[in-house]
Image (cartoon, helix red, strand yellow):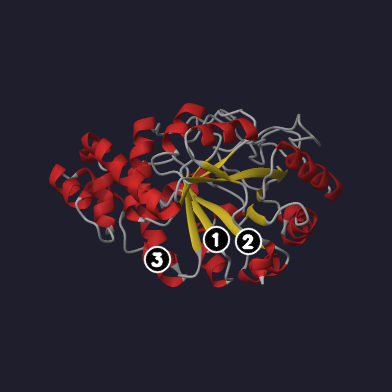
Amino acid sequence: MFSDELKQYDWDETTSRIAAKTARDVEAALGKETALSVDDFMALISPAARPYLEQMARKSRRITRERFGKTISMYIPLYVSNACTNHCVYCGFNHSNPLQRVTLTQEQVKAECEAIRRLGPFENLLIVSGEFPALNGPDYLEQVLHTARPYFHNLTVEVMPLKQRDYERLAASGLNGVVCFQETYHREAYNQYHPRGMKSIFDWRVNGFDRMGAAGLHKIGMGVLIGLEDWRTDVTMMARHLLYLRKHYWRTRFSVNFPRMCPAEGGYQPKVVMTDAELAQLTFAFRLFDNDVDISYSTRESPAFRANMMQLGVTSMSAGSKTEPGGYVSTPDALEQFEVTDSRTPLQVAAEIAALGYEPVWKDWDRRYDG
């Protein structure tokens, strides 16, 4: 399990190593055409790499086009429940926050699917839920998958970490992939951000990726929340985690996402603010570190920034997102998890992608491949 391997990496030592990187280290990493090491990755995300952003961008664009062509995969989230037993201090769904809790019925899930289909020819659906096992656990999720399956070829969930047998069960019901955010790899800080609830168990969450891989899921998405702790150290731990997962579950595809934290219901303010230039640097560094990883941007980011980055390393984007359960048609007044910045319609986003010489890809998986 990765929790065992993670113990060998000291947080403060990693932070110091990143800060100590020099221009020579950055140039050495940029000069490699073979696989980069985690040490190279640390150089590329270090402050010393800031003067090399243009060079990093050019190499990232070249590699992305070689591996993915000029394509952007399109997906859309469907929030099915904001019921949650956790007390994450940064999240609007925090159990202590006084808000209307909504868990969609299967009739409402069906209505949401039909509404999404009217927005655009989506085939990649991301099903999102809070963590409340009694209401939105494996039984409920299996029902949602059965309801959504006739409408979409590729179903992914972003839900509570599950047991391996539950992932296997959901895969048999049409699940293709899982997205899970470790939030932060800083163990002590993690416990402060998640004081109560199932999410407070660090090892259970970080080892969830092993359970996904062991269950044979086609795709695993991972990420940290940018704003909780030092982002450079956090993403280095994530790079180590990705390298570990590639070694142990080599049949699986992987994606990464870097959501920048926003103020949340309850008064949370991000501890760290990442600039656009820093997010671009991180995106380029990950593309150079792992040439084949899918890099995803959500509607948290602005239209102009997304348009620029899709030409330099990003390979998938959401569009038309509603981040409240039932937001497309059923319960549009429920509290959203975060405020979107890119509020354009899916077809408007697709038109811009095409205008920039890229192809919006609505379908890149077929249910027949599920076996």
Indicate whether 277 appears above or below 79.
above
Q: CA distance from mark 3 to mark 1?
A: 15 Å
Q: Residue furthest left?
A: 24
Secondary structure found at label 3: helix
Give the x, y percent position of residue 220.
Answer: 53, 59
Is 167 placed left or right of 50 in the picture? right
Residue density around tag 3, few if under 14, some if 14–19, many if 20 or more, within 10 Å: some
> Which badge, 3 or 1, comes first in the chain's sequence?
1
- Residue displayed at 22% across by 49% down: 30
- In the picture, measured across the screen, residue 159 lies left or right of residue 291, that is right
How crowded pointer 1 is (Cα within 10 Å; few <14, some 14-19, many 20+) is rated as some
Question: In the figure, 325 relative to 69: above or below?
Answer: above
Residue type of the residue flagged with mark 3: Tyr
Give residue 33's quadrant in the image: bottom left
Q: Is residue 342 left or right of residue 244?
A: right
- Left or right of 197 on screen, residue 238: left
Residue 81: x and y in percent read 73, 45
Residue 135: x %, y % from top left: 77, 52
Depth check: 263 or 356 in front? Answer: 356
Give the residue at mark 1: 219
Q: Which of disc 2 and disc 3 is earlier in sequence?
A: 2
Kind of element beneath mark 2? strand
**Residue drawn at 42 percent across, 33 percent down:** 308
- Cβ–Cβ under 8 Å for marks 2 and 1: yes
- Identify the residue at image location x=71%, y=56%: 133
| Quarter-of-image position of residue 323 | top right
Q: Is residue 357 visible?
A: yes
Checking the image for residue 176, the label placed there is 2
Residue under circle 3? Answer: 244
- Residue 303 in picture, x, y percent from top left: 51, 28
